[in-house]
Image: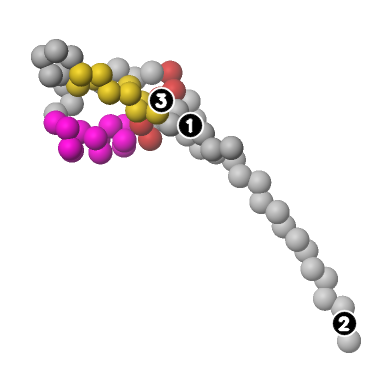
Amino acid sequence: MANKHEIELFISDDGELKVHIKGIKGSGCLKVLDSLAKDLGVIKDKELTSEYYESSTTTQADSVTKIKKDKP
């Protein structure tokens, strides 16, 4: 099952936007934030959550099949 990613946007009465990114570990969340900032405006402040400090690498199991060729 794929990991769930969420982006929450909170807009205050004065028009300030607060973004909360969930489910993206490591510096990947900053890449998403930078991408959003290009369309939404200047980043005023950043507060990193514990997910930022978690490893963003994933392990992947590879299946290796060895084939023995018979000699004629």
The x, y position of residue 16, in whole percent, is: 15, 18
* Above or below, comparing residue 33 to residue 45 in the picture: below
Disc 1 crowd rating (10 Å Cα; few below 14, some 14-19, many 20+) is few
Q: Which mark is residue 35?
A: none
Which residue of the protein is positioned furthest toward the left in this rendering?
14
Whether label 1 touches label 3, CB < 8 Å? yes
Q: Nearer the viewer, residue 31 or 16?
A: 16
- Labels 2 and 3: the sequence-earlier one: 3
Quote the CA–CA distance across marks 1 and 2: 51 Å
Q: Quadrant of residue 51?
A: top left
- The residue at 27%/23% (across/down) is 9
- The residue at 78%/64% (across/down) is 66
Give yes or no for residue 39 being in the magenta stretch.
yes
- Labels 1 and 3: the sequence-earlier one: 1
Q: Which part of the image, by quadrant, shows the C terminus?
A: bottom right
Give yes or no for residue 72 being in the magenta stretch.
no
Residue placed under numbered mark 1 in the picture: 4
Which residue of the protein is positioned furthest toward the bottom in this rendering?
72
From the viewer's perspective, tell me whether residue 72 is left or right of residue 58: right
Residue placed under numbered mark 2 in the picture: 71
Q: Which mark is residue 22?
A: 3
Q: Given the image, on which type of amino acid does mark 2 rest? A: Lys
Secondary structure of the residue carrying numbered label 3 = strand
Disc 2 crowd rating (10 Å Cα; few below 14, some 14-19, many 20+) is few
- The residue at 35%/28% (across/down) is 7
Secondary structure of the residue carrying numbered label 1 = loop
Main SS of residues in magenta: helix
- The residue at 38%/18% (across/down) is 49
Quote the CA–CA distance across marks 1 and 3: 8 Å
From the viewer's perspective, tell me whether residue 65 is left or right of residue 3: right
Numbered range of the magenta stretch: 30-41
